[in-house]
Image (tube, rainbow, N blue to C red):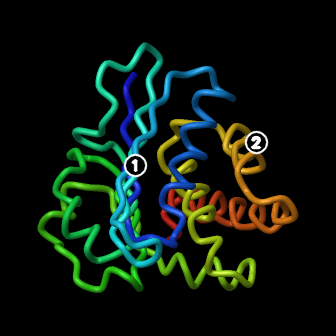
């Protein structure tokens, strides 16, 4: 089993933190092999940002995502640049408010979940910054690669002290959205 996950957007959205959490959940809490790589522009905020996680039950021979099983798009630039890489039948999670120009023809071959993730995070926790954690919860349910318990532990390891409950609230909202999506309610 080799699963490739791509997170993409711009600096300040928590793209890299989301990938670190997924990689940690796989390696530390599920005993799988995991490799996380990242690339971002020189700007600390607003520049392009991409992170990949490869998860496997055997040693990983190549650390990059060649044909992601799951991809998250937090910006139009990321969507335009990486959508074509997602494998046929793969999952694409799209921040619908930040990706207004979509490619229906390319999306037909994917399972697409487009939601106003930033707005949902803000409504749930009062902070738009929790959008990445909410998305990790959604991805966890949609992909079934990792358990919710492992992801919870990895979130608690990674978020700043004092924000644990806030981030768990965002994560659980993501789980809820994923469950609804799987039942066809979104």
Quadrant assignment, res 65: top left
Q: In what quadrant of the picture does the N terminus appear? A: top left
Q: Position of residue 30 (x, y in %)?
A: 64, 26
Marks 1 and 2: CB-CB under 8 Å? no
The CA distance from mark 1 to mark 2 is 22 Å
Q: How many numbered marks are there?
A: 2
Which residue extends farthest left?
105
Tell me what residue is drawn at x 85 percent, y 63 percent: 165
Q: Secondary structure at mark 1?
A: strand
Quadrant assignment, res 3: top left
Q: Nearer the viewer, mark 1 or mark 2?
A: 1
Horizontally, residue 164 falls left or right of residue 80, namely right
Tell me what residue is drawn at x 40 percent, y 42 percent: 37
Tell me what residue is drawn at x 25 percent, y 74 percent: 77
The crowd level at tag 2 (other Cα within 10 Å; few <14, some 14-19, many 20+) is some
The foreground one among 162 and 186 is: 162
Mark 2, residue position = 153
**Of callouts 1 and 2, the N-terminal one:** 1
Q: Position of residue 154 (x, y in %)?
A: 70, 43
Q: Secondary structure at mark 2?
A: helix
Q: Position of residue 123 (x, y in %)?
A: 69, 85
The crowd level at tag 1 (other Cα within 10 Å; few <14, some 14-19, many 20+) is some
26 relative to 137, above or below? above
58 relative to 41, above or below? above
Q: Residue 38: which disc? A: 1
Which residue extends farthest top?
58
21 relative to 74, above or below? above
Tell me what residue is drawn at x 34 percent, y 30 percent: 63
Quadrant assignment, res 168: bottom right
Q: Residue 91: which disc? A: none
The foreground one among 49 and 32 is: 49
């Amino acid at each position: 089993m080799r699963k490739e996950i791509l997170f993409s957007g711009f600096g300040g959205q928590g793209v890299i933190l989301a990938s670190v959490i997924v990689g940690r959940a796989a390696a530390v809490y599920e005993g799988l092999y995991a490799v996380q790589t990242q690339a971002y522009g020189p700007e600390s905020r607003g520049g392009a940002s991409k992170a990949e996680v490869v998860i496997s039950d055997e040693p990983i021979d190549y650390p990059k995502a060649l044909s992601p099983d799951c991809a998250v798009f937090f910006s139009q630039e990321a969507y335009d640049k990486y959508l074509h890489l997602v494998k046929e039948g793969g999952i694409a999670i799209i921040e619908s408010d930040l990706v207004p120009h979509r490619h229906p023809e390319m999306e037909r071959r994917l399972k697409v979940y487009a939601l106003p993730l930033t707005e949902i995070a803000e409504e749930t926790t009062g902070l738009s910054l929790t959008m990445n954690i909410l998305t990790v919860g959604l991805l966890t349910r949609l992909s079934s690669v990792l358990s919710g318990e492992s992801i919870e532990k990895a979130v608690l390891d990674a978020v700043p002290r004092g924000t644990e409950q806030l981030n768990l609230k965002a994560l659980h909202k993501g789980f809820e959205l994923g469950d609804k999506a799987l039942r066809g309610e979104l």
